[in-house]
Amino acid sequence: MTCRIQDTESVSAVELIAERGLEGLPDAMAALINEAMRVERDRHVGAGRYERSDDRRGYANGYKTRTMKTRMGALELRVPQVREGGFYPQSLDKGLRSERALKLALAQMYVEGVSTRKVARITEQLCGFEVSSTEVSRCTALLDEELNAWRERDLGIYPYVYLDARYEKIRHAGQVVDAAVLVALGVASDGKRDVLGVCVELSEAEVHWRHFLEQLAKRGLHGVKLFVSDSHAGLKAARAAVFPSVPWQRCQFHLQQNAGQYVPRQNMRKAVAEDLRTVFNAPDADEARRLLERFLTAWEAKAPKLVAWAATAVPECFAVFMLPAAHRRRLRTSNALERLNKELKRRTRVATLFPSAASCERLASAVAMEISEEWVSGRAYLNMDVED
């Protein structure tokens, strides 16, 4: 279906839905986007239509039509223009990169002959462009240019950096393999989160993590006071090689999950977890070490393998005690990445299998870029003005 261009001053989105019910949703959405773009242009030129203002920086110059393909149908939009040029409404594309990346992944699966009938139906409904190798390549090139610029942008000072990986299924050399999506999230000097980088590799081996971290360093990442991650051997070795002088905080949540592997009986796991939480909730490092000794003594006879492991592993979670108390709760685990991982999972659930590593990286980058823009423009994650 194709909706008609609406005059947003005479017909509101609410009126469209009230008059036409659910059938009015496409027109209502077009009206909302048109109004958002008009407001954005007013802010760009420094004045509304017919408004006299000493702050005016330009003049409106009509509209150009553009068709946007969505799951509701084709929306015919009015894209505002300015006489001086150099204006393009961000509200038009904001939030659409991950949608475009997902469509391209599905289209590539179809073109390369690896899709099922279900994927073919989804592709037909969602893509909004001719599903041919030529058209897929054209759309891919346009999106990759934008995403590559974001992935290669200059970085700066980020006192805290979280590192993590999740796995997605991709086709590689004629086989289906689990590829690692490596992610770095930073907390800047103003306390706001920012996704620093995303990369898809065949594994979490040291060589892959090292390349990823070296690229972050080359882009200007510095001023790091703490890395937060799990205890993957490849990640640990790579971090020590690229950023040898930066302290490391082992994720306490992952450690508690790891502890279950060393508990001899299932009914002991809850008590072990509670005792570990008591150690991690200590007010300072000295008290944490005292509570750890008590933990080791209490479990030595009942779970000797647990005690042997914990004596070395648990102190790796104590780096957070050197930070301001107000920062510790959010830096003792890698939970800051939870929102990003959930959004990636929601999107990749639709594709289920990526036709290539590049396709997976495209979607992961698009999701990360959108969330990062939201974080950078929002409120601070940490108050960086607190004293130790």
Image (cartoon, rainbow, N blue to C red):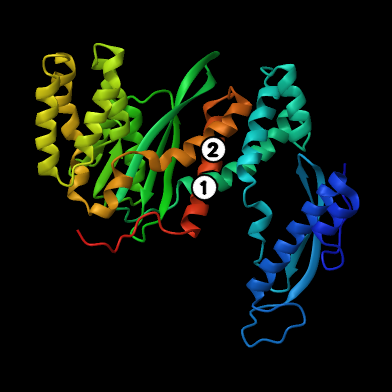
CA–CA distance in space, label 2 to label 1? 9 Å
The amino acid beneath tag 2 is: Glu
User: Which one is nearer the viewer's eye here, 110 or 317?
Assistant: 317
Amino acid type, callout 1: Ile
- Residues 192 and 88: in front is 192
- For the residue pair 384 and 103, the one nearer the viewer reads as 384
* Left or right: 126, with 220 as reference point: right
Whole-percent x, y for residue 53 in the image: 67, 86
Q: Is residue 122 visible?
A: yes
Q: Secondary structure at mark 2?
A: helix
- The residue that label 1 is drawn on is 371
* Residues at circles 2 and 1 in contact by the CB criterion of under 8 Å: yes
Tell me the quadrant of the picture where the N terminus can be found.
top right
Instruction: Please name the residue shown 21% across and 51% down the image.
Output: 323
Q: Residue at x 71, y 87 (%)?
A: 52
**Nearer to us in this view, 255 or 203:** 255
Seen at 69% across and 33% down, the residue is 136
Instruction: Name the disc covering residue 341, or none.
Output: none
Q: Residues within 10 Å of mark 1 (few under 14, many from 20)?
A: some
Secondary structure, mark 1, is helix
**Place of residue 344 in the rendered image (x, y in percent of width and height, measured from the top left):** 53, 35
> Does residue 59 sit above or below 76 in this rendering?
below
Residue annotated with mark 2? 343
Relative to residue 244, is residue 94 drawn left or right? right
Q: Is residue 221 left or right of residue 365?
A: left
